[in-house]
Amino acid sequence: MSTIPIQKTLSKEELYTLIQNYQKNHDQKSKEMIILSNTKLVLSLMKRFYQKSNHYEDLFQVGIVGLIKAVDHFDTNYQLQFSTYAVPLIIGEMKRYLRDNTQVKISRPIKDLAYAILKEKEKYLNQYQREPTIQELSQNLNIEKQNIIEAMQSTQSIASFQDVVGNDNQNELSLSDIVSLDPETLKHYHDHLDLKNAFDCLNQREKKVIQERYYQGYSQCEIADELFVSQAQISRIEKKALEKLHKKLV
């Protein structure tokens, strides 16, 4: 892959200012700064699909398309992390590209339904700033849940753990599960938990979850994706680890 220019990471306030300026004034320089500052996000998401495609340049380009869609439609009034909103759109474009170029042949009706689901998810995300559940997709498209599931499973080879967790009715994600922790929350844990000594009571997986949640600000589903487990499992590991730390510190 050719060299890709990457700009320094912007603060939430800086990013919001640029987004508002672009959406209000169509300032292309603001748009360019937003895209360059989020190039690393696109590259990190590409890693999930490295084994699915050799067309890395194309995969990067469609990822940028998803990023641009996020810039166009992100609503700063919700006060969400931009990456939380952008990730599903970027992954959606990559999955669409891979689905259309896959060697595995899927029947036309199922392929059309999968595409309709993808479009409905994108529409719902733009309106509510979150992805719909299977139940909501079923109601909005007037299609049986089982048919929704089958169509989504038809692209399972390129599905991410984040998508599965986010659309599992038995494990619906709350906003806190998909939004990275804000700096003030991180500071609270840094200031009040002496984790350096208390970490001795945790096993390796518990240490990793706590470090990534409270030191690096990762969401539960981001950690779940990395460890190839469900968000619910990460939630249980985190809860158990915090209980251990609480007992140790008290």
Image: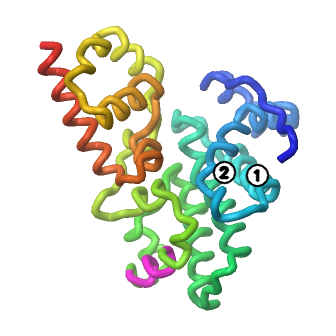
Give how far across and how far down residue 49 sits, in percent: 63, 58
> Alpha carbon of mark 1 to alpha carbon of mark 2: how far?
7 Å
> Which region shows up in magenta?
146-152
Q: Residue at x 39, y 25 (%)?
A: 214
Q: Residue at x 75, y 34 (%)?
A: 34
Residue 35 against residue 115 in the figure, above or below:
above
Give how far across and how far down residue 213 sits, in percent: 39, 31
Give the residue pinned by disc 1. 60
Residue 8 horizontal side relative to residue 226, left or right: right
Q: Earlier in the sequence, mark 1 or mark 2?
A: 2
Disc 1 crowd rating (10 Å Cα; few below 14, some 14-19, many 20+) is many
Amino acid type indicated by mark 2: Met
191 or 225: nearer the viewer: 225
Give how far across and how far down residue 152 sits, in percent: 50, 74
Give the residue pinned by disc 2. 46
Residue 137 horizontal side relative to residue 106, left or right: left
